[in-house]
Image: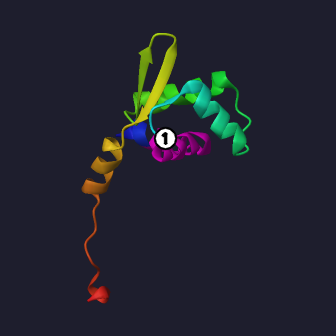
Amino acid sequence: MGDVYKALADPTRRAILDELQDRSGQTLFELCTRLIGKGFTSSRQAISQHLAVLEDAGLVVVRREGRYIFIDLDASPLQQIYQRWRVGPCASDT
């Protein structure tokens, strides 16, 4: 689970996850273009390195189809974190 926290610690990686939440299954080119449109100046190589960290943490699935690389969001590690520290209603809320 430590890899998930490391992956989430970087603002560029969080932006990548946000983009994939909006539209999963993007190509690497589409993802880079959308990030540049939102003011990120990371190179394609830098985005690929960030994706490797996210993939190691289990937060994205990278699949190849011919010449194209597609990236899908996998939020299951985040669900595990939520389940671990889920908090019920506070006594003051009742």
Viewer-closest of 27 and 46: 27
Left or right, 82 with respect to 71, comes to left
Q: Is residue 13 magenta?
A: yes
Residue found 36% across the figure and 43% down from its top: 75
List x then y, in percent, for residue 51.
52, 29
- Residue sitting at x 58%, y 33%: 31
Quadrant into which the C terminus falls: bottom left
Would residue 54 appear left or right of 11 to someone viewing this image?
A: left
Magenta range is 5-23
Of residues 34 and 4, which is closer to you in this image? 34
State the residue in front, 51 or 34. 34
In the image, residue 42 lies in the stretch drawn in magenta = no
Residue sitting at the far top: 66
- Compared to residue 43, the image places residue 14 above or below, namely below
Where residue 48 sits, quadrant-wise, is: top right
Please give the residue where the numbered disc 1 appears in the rendered image. Answer: 20
Please, what secondary structure does the residue beneath circle 1 have? helix
**SS assignment for the magenta stretch, majority:** helix
Q: Work out whether 54 lies above or below 22.
A: above
Residue drawn at point x = 35 percent, y = 47 percent: 78
**What residue appears at the point 60 percent right and 31 percent down from the top-left corner?**
30
Q: How is the image coloured?
A: rainbow
Locate residue 59, reporting x and y percent: 40, 37
